[in-house]
Image (cartoon, coloured by chain):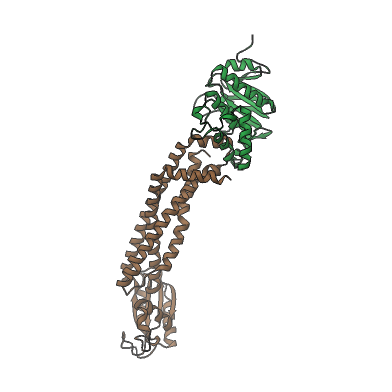
Chain colours: A brown, B green
Amino acid sequence: MQLRHVNTNLRQGLRRNASMHLAVILTLFVSLSLAGIGLMMSKQADLTVDVIGSELQIQVVLCLPDDPQNASCTSEVTEEQKSAIADAIEDNPEVADVTFESKAQSLEKLKVLLGPEQFEGPDPVFTVEDAPQAVRITLKDPNDFDGTVDAVANLDGVSYITLAKDEVKPIFTLIDVLQYSSWGAAAALILASILLVANTIRLTALARRKEIEIMRLVGASRIFIALPFLLEALVTALVGVGLAIGAVAAFTQFAIVGGLGEVVKALPFIGWPEWVETSLVLLAVAPVLTVVPTLLLTRKYLRL
Amino acid sequence: MIRFEKVTKSYAGPDKPALNQVTINVDKGEFVFLVGASGSGKSTALRLLLREMRPTTGRVYVAGKEINRLATWKVPRLRRQIGTVFQDFRLLQNKNVSENVAFALQVIGRSNRDIKRMVPETLELVGLADKANRMPEELSGGEQQRVAVARAMVNDPMILIADEPTGNLDPATSAGIMKLLDRINGTGTTVLMATHDHGVVDQGRKRVVELEHGRVVRDEASGVYGYQH
């Protein structure tokens, strides 16, 4: 293949449609940034569910010796009490899933919630002995919890019960709103960028119609004719996604790591590992978003 | 080399078909004039040969292959076997003579070494070796058409299709182009030329196929433009 010819055409194409390419880059930049933020939000939601439970969950916290939450708890929950609690839960039709949390697992979650400082050093505020065992129940319906609560509330060995529904609903509502509004705006802008790509191809096809007509007549392959268009799309996609990755990095630094993460200590927040994952997704998605429409549209406008 | 077998081509709309049950057979190395009034179906026949479209019914063969059944990705390979020349030359104004001819080789991926060898040879063939660096606007109509012929021939096709190649030229220049096409035909290339040009056809004394309202109304081995009385 004549690489020099392709290269010359690519440079000419980028120069000829500079303003159009700039428009595509800007819309891709904004749309991918929003999509990236949406993805980060969904990761934040997953992390929040992992640590504090989803609104479908009930947490049955079991007794500790001298339990500060429940005076009737005098000793650590026994194995017999635990099995009685398990039987009561598993017989309940409202329950979808049950997991037991050991003292060590409970301690790990406390560390995430409260920060590691209080668990370290020679005389830590919390040790594994202070962490209660718990039963995490996932409900089939977040509103059907009465039967389960009634079944376990008065059993021996139960310290207290928390309904995640009441605690986490506002947080999930906020995350959901941010996530879906980001994705909605991203989808609209991605559509706009595809329309811009279509316009660019139409204009270029018009400007180069004689050249393309000759290429077709002398037997240039479809891929050869479409290649400058595809490369232009790829270049704009890469510039757009580069800017978007930068914008998501800024969001991660200023809104999460150095922002909410500093202010709201009661919740765990995502960070740079999630930014890397999101960047990889954007890197994979952006070329597809421009190259696939270009392939389809070149067929249409160049009659390939 | 070329065979139309009961070819009918209808376009959308109530009009009569552009080609109606046309059967034409052109042997290897033949020179055929395709004549007829505007709208008689000449251009449709040429476009079918280039697989710009498919016939509504019937079959079109090039070098023994039925081209309407050709997979789309194989069409470029078919077109490399067919050189095409048009009335309006269709040269790229931002490229000089040599670059215009080289373009046809570049876009099918020929190597630079091939291009450096083949372009001057072809310019020699069409008599433009000394104008390789001229821009199209610096050339006369006849010279521009020679460049177009060079571009069509540079890849050494089996068939040369010429659609009104003398339509924009005066009689003396037309005669020069005809001599060139004759010489190309002499090297074994099959030439199919659609034309309105009475003078060119009458002087050529070659096979004439006449189309009228999409039908073949005359096929003479050594004909003139109109009927011979």
B194 vs A291, left or right, is right
B2 to B211, vertically: above or below? below
Query: Horizontal placement of B4 versus A260: left or right?
Result: right
Say which quarter of the image contains residue A159.
bottom left
- Please report the residue visible at 67 percent of the width from the left and 26 percent of the height from the top: B185
Query: Where is residue A242 shown, x and y percent of the image?
Result: 42, 57
Residue placed farthest to the front in the image? Answer: B130
Closest to the observer, A176 or B210? B210
Q: Height in image: A78 above or below B70? A: below
* A109 or A141: nearer the viewer: A109
| Residue sitting at the far top | B229
**Residue drawn 40% across the image and 81% down it:** A107
Q: Name the residue at the left extreme.
A: A263
Q: What residue is shown at x 68% (from left), y 33% (from top)?
A: B63
Whether residue B55 can be seen here: no
Say which quarter of the image contains residue A86: bottom left
Number of numbered discs: 0
In the image: residue B102, left or right of residue A273:
right
Query: Residue A268's x, y, as percent?
Result: 36, 72
Could you say where residue B196 lies in the image, as x and y percent from the top left?
A: 56, 19
Q: Position of residue A129 (x, y in %)?
A: 39, 87
Q: Quadrant of the N terminus of chain A?
A: top right
Q: Is residue B123 visible?
A: yes
Q: Nearer the viewer, residue B189 or B4?
A: B189
